[in-house]
Image: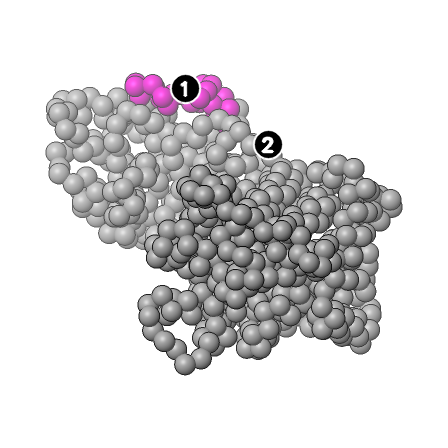
């Protein structure tokens, strides 16, 4: 919340500045929101504690209530149960090493709640909680230079000393050459190394594919987790769903959806 | 170290600050009031999801069904063109109550509305009578709207040229009552967006219709119509009696307060939604009567009954106009009935939460997340009352029970301002509070006197029964100043 607003607006992958301008004053741990519908039986799936061991986890337990029910009414009846479950989950995550904050919200609208908490905690990413057996290799799908600094901060923050292989992956845009793609990824690679990831743990992969979602989901199969950006809602996303959701559905493993820079209030 | 507020993470707001609900839309001032109410007490926090438009839609959507689509015929028959004065009187009284109610709501933005203010301000006995009265008042109101809805549904058959052997209004109303109750029990679709859309569509249809009608009445499209004598033969008395009858058209603004716990930025949005919705519908009602009484003589309007507006529209633009008003009438009475059923269920929740009635009444159904007992306690009697088909009686009893609450809201405001307890810190202050509340309270009680004796009798019986219940069941409940 102390970043300069212009940071991700530039065309250059100007990473490294985030830490310099004040992120370090707060905490180096990237904030990751983990939303769970606790009363519907959702819990952090296996592998999540390991994946987020270096994160500051905002563990959001939420319960969606129909409009004919007052939120207070639901809290009165279910609050205690939900809170104790959430406490258990938080313990599990903390044992693996993460800083955990828990929030329990009764809401009529899940999106409003998730969005509010992303703001409040300035979350770098939201986890789509799926299970994984281990966390040895991560696919980082990068679309372009805009906002890439946030991906770098997240990946470096989570996996710098974790002995995890990182594969940087880029699907070429129309009119973009293979060289453009490679030099983009190499720039990101340099930034990651500066931030403490081992050079020989980073691979780069540029591909020319028609459907980037299919390509990402396909590549993801040989990895344990995916990091990708969020997409602006549009007609296409309205009809087919958000790309990150589609990838998560097919991949069936955990997906960290990197959030856009939220405008300062 | 895993609890919500780990002290070693200085950056984020703690749970107590977080209720400030900084809206993502940007630029909003955090609402200190909401922050206090929503603060996580160890059992989770509450997301506020209804904005100003949603609040206005609840108020307008609850009210507009009756005043425009059910009452014009009845009101004109009783008071002639002066019925528009009756509606204006109702609007003034509603405003005089809406202002104090807004102040109280911003001091106590909790679900339960008028019941909550009165039980906290005046104590358990008054609270119990008003709380149970509010539940039954809404039950009567919903039954009244259902009969209106049935009339419009019946009009559909009429327009289609299908002759029915009996008047279908009451059976259809009952059927809708059963359907709506079932829908609210099992439906988990979010209907807020739908409700907003319905209200906007209604306002568009009405604005077009009333603009055309007004121009026509003023002679723009031909010969100016000769207005009949403004005041009815009986003078002021029928006008006041009609004001008492049609006051049901203004019951919706308090419904905004019953969902106060879900409204974003309550200090700003609650007063705006309550006062704004009264002003909006008030203007529509007055113009509607003006247009209707210009189109037909009052006696003729009376013969048309509940669906008089359909005939008015037909006289202007023929069948398309009639159909537009039939559709609008269906939407309006449907949304009024639906809103009243939900409000009645919230009223049951509010009294049961406080132990005025057994706690079982507010249990939620785990599968659907809906308060099935409360909805049953609302829907059951609503269906029975709708079956009586007594439009005027249902409307007046609903008004009676609400007016008692409104009067007491004004009393509560005066009392709280006088005593000024530590917890009383409204962020909206009613201008000229004592005067507004004083006049508003007196006017509310006075209006009751102009009702039919049968309505007064039923209303009084309900209140006595509510007090009896309180003496029997809830004398040990202490609610004054309890949060």
The residue depicted at 73 percent of the width and 54 percent of the height is B236
Q: Nearer the viewer, residue B209 or A132?
A: B209
Q: Could you say whether the residue bearing mark 2 is in a helix, strand or loop?
A: loop
Residue B177: x and y in percent read 50, 71
Q: How many marks?
A: 2
Name above or below for residue B344 compared with residue A64: below
- Please say whether residue B92 is one of the residues in the magenta stretch: no
Mark 2 vs 1: CB contact within 8 A: no
The residue depicted at 36 percent of the width and 48 percent of the height is A128
Q: Nearer the viewer, residue B456 or B408?
A: B456
Q: Quadrant of residue B222?
A: top left
> Is residue B186 in sight in this rendering?
no
Q: Chain of mark 1?
A: A
Calculate the distance from the C-alpha at mark 2 to the C-alpha at mark 1.
24 Å
- Please say whether residue A9 is one of the residues in the magenta stretch: yes
Q: Which mark is residue B179?
A: none
Q: Could you say whether the residue bearing mark 1 is in a helix, strand or loop?
A: helix
Q: Quadrant of the N terminus of chain B?
A: top right
Give, as a single range, the part of the protein colored magenta.
A1-23
Residue on which the image places disc 1: A6
Q: Chain of mark 2?
A: B
Q: Nearer the viewer, residue B27 or B121?
A: B121
Residue B62: x and y in percent read 55, 56
Q: Disc 2 vs disc 1: which is toward the camera?
A: 2
Residue on which the image places disc 2: B29
Name above or below for residue B365 compared with residue A210: below
> Is residue B103 in sight in this rendering?
yes
Name above or below for residue A145 compared with residue B343: above
Residue A138: x and y in percent read 28, 40
The residue depicted at 78 percent of the width and 37 percent of the height is B432
């Amino acid at each position: 919340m102390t970043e300069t607003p212009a940071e991700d607006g530039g065309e250059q992958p100007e990473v490294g500045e985030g830490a310099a301008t004040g992120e370090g004053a707060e905490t180096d741990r990237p904030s990751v929101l983990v939303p769970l519908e606790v009363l519907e039986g959702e819990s952090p799936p296996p592998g999540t504690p390991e994946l987020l061991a270096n994160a500051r986890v905002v563990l959001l337990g939420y319960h969606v209530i129909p409009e004919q029910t007052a939120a207070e009414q639901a809290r009165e009846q279910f609050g205690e149960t939900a809170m104790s479950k959430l406490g258990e989950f938080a313990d599990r995550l903390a044992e693996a090493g993460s800083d955990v904050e828990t929030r329990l919200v009764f809401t009529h609208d899940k999106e409003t709640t998730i969005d509010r908490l992303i703001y409040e905690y300035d979350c770098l990413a939201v986890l789509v909680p799926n299970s994984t057996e281990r966390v040895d290799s991560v696919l980082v799908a990068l679309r372009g230079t805009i906002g890439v600094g946030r991906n770098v901060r997240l990946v470096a923050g989570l996996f710098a000393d974790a002995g995890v292989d990182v594969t940087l992956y880029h699907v070429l845009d129309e009119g973009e050459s293979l060289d453009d793609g490679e030099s983009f990824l190499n720039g990101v690679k340099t930034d990651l190394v500066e931030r403490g990831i081992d050079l020989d743990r980073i691979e780069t992969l540029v591909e020319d594919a028609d459907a980037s979602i299919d390509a990402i989901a396909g590549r993801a199969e040989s990895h344990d987790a995916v990091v990708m950006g969020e997409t602006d809602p549009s007609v296409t996303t309205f009809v087919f769903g958000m790309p990150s959701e589609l990838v998560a559905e097919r991949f069936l493993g955990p997906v960290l959806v990197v959030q856009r820079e939220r405008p300062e209030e | 170290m895993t609890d919500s507020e780990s002290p070693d993470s200085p950056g984020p707001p703690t749970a107590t600050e977080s209720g400030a609900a900084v809206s993502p839309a940007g630029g909003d001032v955090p609402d200190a009031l909401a922050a206090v109410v929503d603060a996580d007490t160890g059992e989770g926090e509450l997301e506020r999801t209804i904005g100003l438009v949603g609040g206005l839609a609840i108020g307008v959507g609850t009210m507009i069904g009756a005043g425009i689509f059910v009452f014009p015929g009845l009101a004109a028959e009783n008071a002639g063109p002066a019925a528009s004065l009756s509606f204006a009187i109702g609007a003034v009284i509603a405003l005089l109550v809406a202002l104090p109610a807004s102040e109280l709501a911003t001091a106590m933005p909790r679900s339960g509305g008028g019941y909550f203010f009165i039980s906290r301000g005046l104590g358990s006995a008054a609270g119990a009578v008003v709380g149970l009265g509010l539940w039954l008042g809404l039950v009567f109101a919903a039954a009244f709207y259902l009969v209106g809805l049935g009339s419009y549904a019946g009009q559909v058959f009429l327009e289609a040229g299908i002759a029915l052997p009996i008047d279908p209004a009451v059976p259809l109303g009952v059927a809708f009552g059963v359907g709506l109750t079932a829908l609210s029990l099992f439906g988990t679709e979010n209907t807020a967006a739908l409700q907003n859309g319905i209200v906007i569509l209604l306002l568009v249809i009405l604005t077009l219709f009333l603009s055309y009608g007004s121009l026509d009445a003023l002679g723009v499209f031909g010969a100016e119509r000769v207005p009949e004598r403004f005041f009815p033969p009986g003078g002021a008395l029928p006008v006041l009696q009609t004001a008492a009858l049609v006051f049901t058209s203004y019951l919706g603004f308090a419904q905004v307060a019953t969902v106060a716990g879900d409204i974003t930025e309550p200090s700003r949005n609650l007063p705006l939604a309550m006062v704004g919705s009264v002003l909006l519908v008030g203007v529509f009602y007055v113009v509607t009567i003006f247009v209707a009484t210009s189109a037909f003589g009052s006696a003729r309007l009376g013969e048309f009954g509940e669906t008089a507006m359909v005939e008015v529209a037909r006289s202007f633009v023929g069948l398309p106009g009639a159909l537009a008003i039939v559709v609008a009438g269906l939407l309006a009475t449907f949304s009024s009935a639906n809103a009243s059923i939900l409000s009645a269920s919230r009223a049951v929740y509010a009294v049961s939460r406080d132990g005025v009635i057994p706690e079982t009444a507010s249990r939620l159904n785990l599968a659907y997340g809906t308060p099935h007992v409360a909805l049953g306690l609302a829907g059951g009697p609503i269906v029975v009352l709708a079956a009586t088909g007594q439009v005027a009686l249902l409307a007046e009893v609903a008004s009676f029970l609400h007016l008692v609450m409104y009067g007491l809201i004004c009393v509560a405001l005066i009392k709280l301002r006088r005593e000024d307890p530590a917890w009383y810190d409204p962020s909206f202050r009613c201008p000229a509070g004592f005067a507004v509340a004083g006049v508003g309270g007196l006017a509310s009680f006075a209006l009751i006197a102009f009702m039919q004796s049968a309505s007064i009798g039923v209303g009084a019986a309900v209140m006595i029964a509510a007090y009896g219940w309180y003496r029997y069941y809830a004398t040990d409940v202490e609610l004054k100043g309890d949060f």
